């Protein structure tokens, strides 16, 4: 082997630290940190800042570990889809085996450390979340059923519940309501994406609802989930995590969201194609803001509480 | 004359090693801070001598 070939080969396979960090899906991790932080602060028990910081960090690492396992397993379809083709494994920067080892090692570390820093119920929930996302969703159901997004949404919904358990050591209806908020929000969020990222999932052979049941059915599903979400999100305003600030935010946001879903339902492909899926794109952007502001409002209620202003 | 390797790959490796080193250092500091917080909190109790001997 010549020097030139050695260098070229080594350069291609040598990853930087940033490439390993990208395996952990930093954008998903930031959502995990935010929602878990809100779940922890919304709980009626205060947490020492050092314990809270460490626990959320370990939770984020656990979420990142499941992301690395997901990228290891899905490297074949990631390379086919435009949205994911630049991920470290399909881009040739990280070897699949490295992602597997990193994912397994960080999973074990994060669960053990969360158990030691917070409690073992939180650690058990984190272990279940990693298992659910990496095995049940990624390996088993993602390529098998068009309800894959609904099932995968459960994994993303656990962080605020775990945040609540970090603080209280037990589960309660409020923790599960925050879980349900993300769980019901995820399908319309991803189905809107699937409507305007048209060829990606088709090319990869992932049985998205748009592929298996058609686009009109996907539009109906988006509207149905949004109606359920409206009732759930506004209803949560009357529990101990809610209050006037949350209720106003929930009514405004859910009305806008429902209007967006109604507009999507009314359209057909010809109309959508004519304006390059403007309504679907707008709905997708609103869905990101929707979740951020809902949890922001729960956080606001929790922060106002010591001054006697938050909650009912 | 000593061999001096000057290549972009070495810089990248150095960056990676420094990064891993800093993360391990931060992890040690965090575990120390956690331990200190736990043993100074009100509900921390040392095991009684007779419990230790059993």
Image (spheres, rainbow, N blue to C red):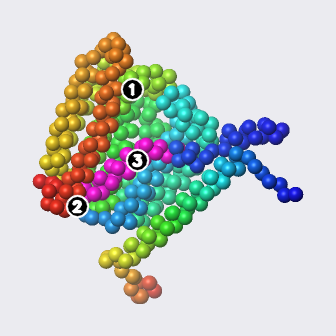
Tell me if A102 is positioned left or right of A242 in this view. Answer: right
The disc label shown at residue A30, or none: 3
Q: Secondary structure at mark 2?
A: loop
| Label 1: chain letter | A
Q: Which residues are magenta?
A: A23-44
> Residue A305 location in percent, x, y?
18, 59
Residue hosting label 2? A44
Q: Earlier in the sequence, mark 3 or mark 2?
A: 3
Q: Quadrant of residue A115?
A: bottom left
Residue A255 or A118: which is nearer the viewer? A255
Q: Residue furthest bottom?
A: B49
Q: Is residue A73 visible?
A: no
- CB atoms at circles 1 and 2 under 8 Å apart? no
The disc label shown at residue A194, or none: 1
Q: Main secondary structure of the magenta part?
A: helix
Tell me if A270 is positioned left or right of B52 in this view. Answer: left
Residue A202 against residue B11 in the figure, above or below: above
> What residue is rendered at 49% in x and 53% in y?
A107
Q: Earlier in the sequence, mark 1 or mark 2?
A: 2
Q: Quadrant of residue A293?
A: top left
> What residue is rendered at 37% in x and 23% in y?
A195
> Residue B48 location in percent, x, y?
39, 86
Q: Secondary structure at mark 1?
A: helix
| Label 2: chain letter | A
Residue A129 against residue A118 in the figure, above or below: above
**In magenta segment, residue B40:** no
Tell me if A309 is positioned left or right of A57 in this view. Answer: left
Q: Earlier in the sequence, mark 3 or mark 1?
A: 3
Tell me if A55 is positioned left or right of A93 in this view. Answer: left
> What residue is rendered at 47% in x and 43% in y?
A25
């Amino acid at each position: 082997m010549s020097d030139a070939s050695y260098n070229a080969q080594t350069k291609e396979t040598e990853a930087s630290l940033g490439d390993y960090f990208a395996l952990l899906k930093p954008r998903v991790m930031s959502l995990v940190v935010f929602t878990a932080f809100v779940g922890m602060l919304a709980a009626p028990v205060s947490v020492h800042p050092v314990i809270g910081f460490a626990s959320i960090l370990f939770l984020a690492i656990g979420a990142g570990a499941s992301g690395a396992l997901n990228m290891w397993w899905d490297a074949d379809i990631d390379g086919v889809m435009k949205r994911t083709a630049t991920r470290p494994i399909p881009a040739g920067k990280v070897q699949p085996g490295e992602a597997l080892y990193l994912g397994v090692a960080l999973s074990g570390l994060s669960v053990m450390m969360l158990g030691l820093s917070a409690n073992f119920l939180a650690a058990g929930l984190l272990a279940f979340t990693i298992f659910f996302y990496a095995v049940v969703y990624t390996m088993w159901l993602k390529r098998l059923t068009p309800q894959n997004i609904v099932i995968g949404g459960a994994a993303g919904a656990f962080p605020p519940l775990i945040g609540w358990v970090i603080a209280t050591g037990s589960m309660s209806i409020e923790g599960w309501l925050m879980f349900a908020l993300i769980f019901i929000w995820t399908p319309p969020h991803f189905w809107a994406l699937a409507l305007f990222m048209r060829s990606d999932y088709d090319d990869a052979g992932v049985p998205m609802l748009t592929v298996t049941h058609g686009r009109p059915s996907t539009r109906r599903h988006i509207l149905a989930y949004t109606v359920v979400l409206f009732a759930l999100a506004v209803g949560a305003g009357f529990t101990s995590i809610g209050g006037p600030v949350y209720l106003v935010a929930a009514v405004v946001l859910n009305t806008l969201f429902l209007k967006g879903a109604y507009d999507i339902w009314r359209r057909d492909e010809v109309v959508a194609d004519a304006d390059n899926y403007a309504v679907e794109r707008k709905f997708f952007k609103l869905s990101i803001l929707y979740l951020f502001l809902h949890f922001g409002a729960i956080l606001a209620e929790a922060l106002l509480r010591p001054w006697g202003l938050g909650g009912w | 004359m000593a061999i001096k390797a000057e290549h972009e790959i070495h810089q990248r490796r150095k960056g990676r090693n420094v990064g891993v080193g800093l993360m391990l250092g931060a992890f040690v500091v965090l575990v120390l801070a956690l331990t200190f917080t736990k043993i100074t909190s009100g509900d921390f109790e040392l095991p009684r001598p007779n419990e230790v001997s059993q």
